[in-house]
Image: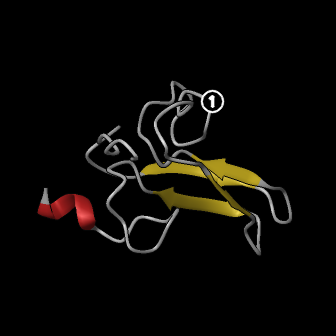
Amino acid sequence: MAEEAIVAQAGPYQVELTEGKPYFYCRCGRSQKQPFCDGTHAGTGIEPLRFVVDHTGTFNICGCKQTDDEPFCDGSHLLL
């Protein structure tokens, strides 16, 4: 059984991402390299999400791990 994700930050991380480059979004909330995976999820039953953006720019990546639009912030942190 998977553990529960923890809130890494009660708001989004604003990060610069490059078109076509693969990224791994931390879904467990335990990574020290938020919002990206550092392997800390091992043994939690929660796997990171691999994603690629379609243009280079600044993106709001979810920090609360409650978004319905992974890995992007959808404002779910406002309901915590």
Q: Amino acid at mark 1?
A: Asp
Q: Position of residue 73 (x, y in %)?
A: 41, 64
Question: For this rendering, which residue is in front, 49 or 78?
Answer: 49
- Residue 1 position, x and y percent, is 39, 47
**Image x and y of residue 66, in percent:** 32, 60
Image quadrant where residue 51 sits: bottom right
How many other residues sit within 10 Å of disc 1, few (<14), some (14-19) or many (≥20)? Answer: some
Question: Residue 35: image x %, image y %?
Answer: 52, 42
Vertical relation: 52 (above or below) 11: below
Seen as rendered, the residue at the extreme front is: 1
Nearest the viewer among 67 and 74 is: 67
**What residue is shown with label 1?**
38
The residue drawn where x is 25% and y is 46% is 10
Q: Residue at x 38, y 73 (%)?
A: 68
Q: Is residue 64 left or right of residue 71?
A: left
Asked if residue 43 is positioned above or below residue 64 in the image, the reply reads: above
What residue is at 31 percent from the left and 45 percent from the top? Answer: 4
Q: Residue at x 76, y 64 (%)?
A: 56
The number of discs equals 1
Q: Secondary structure at mark 1?
A: loop
Locate the C terminus by quadrant. bottom left
Of residues 39 and 22, the one nearer the viewer is: 39
List the single residue furthest toward the right: 20
- Tell me how the rendering is colored: secondary structure
